[in-house]
Amino acid sequence: MASIEEAIEYSFKDKELLAQALTHKSYSTERGQAGFNERLEFLGDSVLGLIVAYYLFTKYPCEDEGYLSKVKSVLVSRTNLARWAKDLNLGEHVFLGVGESQTGGMKRSSILANSLEALIGAVYLDGGLEKAFVLVSRWLDRPGASSVETDYKSTLQELIQKRHKKPPEYEIMHTEGPEHEKVFTVRVKIGRKVLGVGAGKNKKEAQQAAARNAFDYLESHELHTHEL
């Protein structure tokens, strides 16, 4: 666990708290243990929300509540949390049950995002709000971290290319409406498997919507060879 402490630049006084933050329910259940990270995840979610809200409030003194809410929703999204977790190689440190481990749980976005929230909750309990703020703000200060627009198409391509060694394909299913108000409906697939469908006022917007739905689907589903 020392390497994850090095990655987050924080040393726990209570190592058991760190161990709990890194323990997935599947691991605990297989061993008949009581402790796993869901309670810390619950706490970390609220701590993260408070820190991000305060960070944006001070960073953008002239922006209104609507803008701040929009940026906050991007920063605390599953997509962003999973990206932060991957930067830390957090998946390599999470204790998973055999089944979760064999099906690629250490790379699953939902597990990574939840484990990161649990880790934030553990830092808060061990070192207080100041230490948790230092941990989170280090990620928030990265270039582009507060960008409102998330490029789901690029994110999806990176994910699928890494897992399946080939890019996703986009197809226009249909268009409707008059020329100046057309609505495009696009689907994205890999092989024969349709991952998501999206609509927009142009092809680019529809592709982004389809990619976002596909990414959300892949957070909780694994693709198998016979589906592709």
Image (cartoon, rainbow, N blue to C red):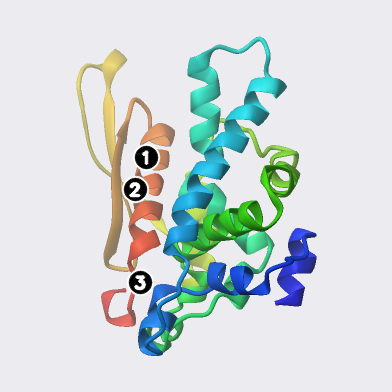
Q: Amino acid at mark 2?
A: Asn
Give the residue type that dot 1 points to. Answer: Ala
Q: Which of the image's four quarters has the C terminus?
A: bottom left
Give the residue at mark 1: 209
Distance between the Cα atoms at labels 3 and 2? 15 Å
Label 3, residues with CA under 10 Å away: few <14, some 14-19, many ≥20: few
Residue at left 33%, top 78%?
224
| Amino acid on which the number 3 mark rests in the picture | Glu
Which one is in front, 218 or 99?
Answer: 99
Name which of mark 3 and mark 2 comes first in the sequence.
2
Q: Position of residue 189 (x, y in %)?
A: 33, 59
Residue 132's spot in the image, x, y percent?
A: 68, 48
Residue 173 position in % (x across, y down): 23, 44
Dot 2 falls on a residue whose secondary structure is helix
x then y, percent, for residue 82: 54, 57
Tag 2 residue: 213
> Which mark, by number, is residue 150?
none
- Mark earlier in primary sequence (3, 1): 1
Q: Which mark is residue 222?
A: 3
Q: CA distance from mark 3 to mark 1?
A: 20 Å
